[in-house]
Amino acid sequence: MSAWDTTAPVRTAPLVDRASDDAARAAVAARDFDDPALASAAAIAANVTARLEAFLTEFRIGNNYVYRDHLRQNLIINEYYLEVDRAHLASFDDTLAGFLTEKPSVVLPLFEDAVKNVSRRLKVAERIERTDAVMDADGEPGIISAYDVPDCQVMVLSNSNHTEIRHLDSSSITKLVRIHGIVIAAGSLSVKATHVHVRCKSCSHSMDIPVSSGFAGINLPRYCTNPDPETKDCPVDPFVVIHDRSRFVDMQTLKLQEAPDTVPVGELPRHVLLSCD
């Protein structure tokens, strides 16, 4: 019998949202990212997120639902992260694992959204099982909003072959690669915005602007984007940042240098800068 059994029989601890579970299983069945029915970027993102949720809730080794149980344990001790082995994802859905390798900047945010969605469902299930669960006016468990579950970080583990720092080239850009070396410098802990909330000084129109990971910054829109035609004309550069409604994470910069035994004779060791959120 194989040790990697990713079939999904009847769950030992069913989640509450069975409709979402059925939608996730249907999404897993649609294995083609280029399906014409999923032409829009939003539809593709929703499909990928649903498939990732199915992986988190249904992947198991023997009778152990690995990631669902780990996530539940982390939520109990307020550790909002999840370590995911890429080999497990590949055994569950090799297409999704390949997409993660080719487009990590696209898949990782969706992966973290999937972890947050599953966390909300686990909290709902936990609230129902508790004898002192808070009931609303209709006698149902209180609704858990998205803000009741903090953002969860996904850390990808891999045993794939590592790439030497000096061998990184243009083909490695935007790809998921594995490198090793020695940390020779660490910057001081700083704060980085993940979502910036801006408001127009003239018409008070507001919106959230996502900030890319890494060393990327953000450019505020030069013109107001209020769709209401009745608003008065806004000047150029009307937006100001509302810090209280923006979201931030801790960030640190590391300098990773090649290991001494990998440096060719007569050459200087090379290094790369890493942004750790």
Image (cartoon, grey):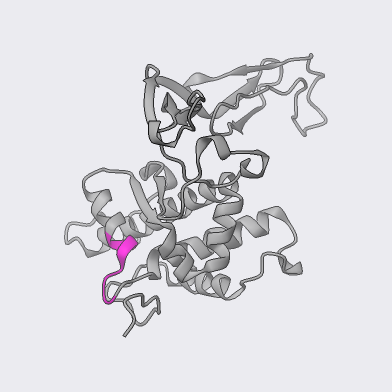
Residue 209 in magenta? no
Residue 68 in magenta? yes
Residue 43: horizontal and vertical position, in percent? Answer: 67, 59
Task: Say left or right for 235 vs 262.
Answer: right
Occupied quadrant, residue 230: top right
The magenta segment is: 62-69
Residue 222: horizontal and vertical position, in percent? Answer: 76, 20
**Which quadrant does the N terminus fall into?**
bottom left
**Which quadrant does the C terminus fall into?**
top left
Of residue 262 and residue 218, the one placed in the foreground of this image is: 262
Residue at image location 49% in from the left, 33% down from the top: 264
Image vertical order of residue 137 relative to residue 258, above or below: below
Residue at image location 52% in from the left, 46% down from the top: 177
Residue 96: horizontal and vertical position, in percent? Answer: 55, 62
Is residue 139 visible to us here? no
Image vertical order of residue 61 relative to residue 251, above or below: below
Occupied quadrant, residue 166: top right
Residue at image location 40% in from the left, 34% down from the top: 181
Residue 274: horizontal and vertical position, in percent? Answer: 47, 29
Occupied quadrant, residue 133: bottom left
Is residue 266 visible to us here? yes
Task: Say left or right for 44 vs 36.
Answer: left
Task: Say left or right for 66 vs 103.
Answer: left
Residue that lies at the very extreme toward the bottom in this rendered image: 1
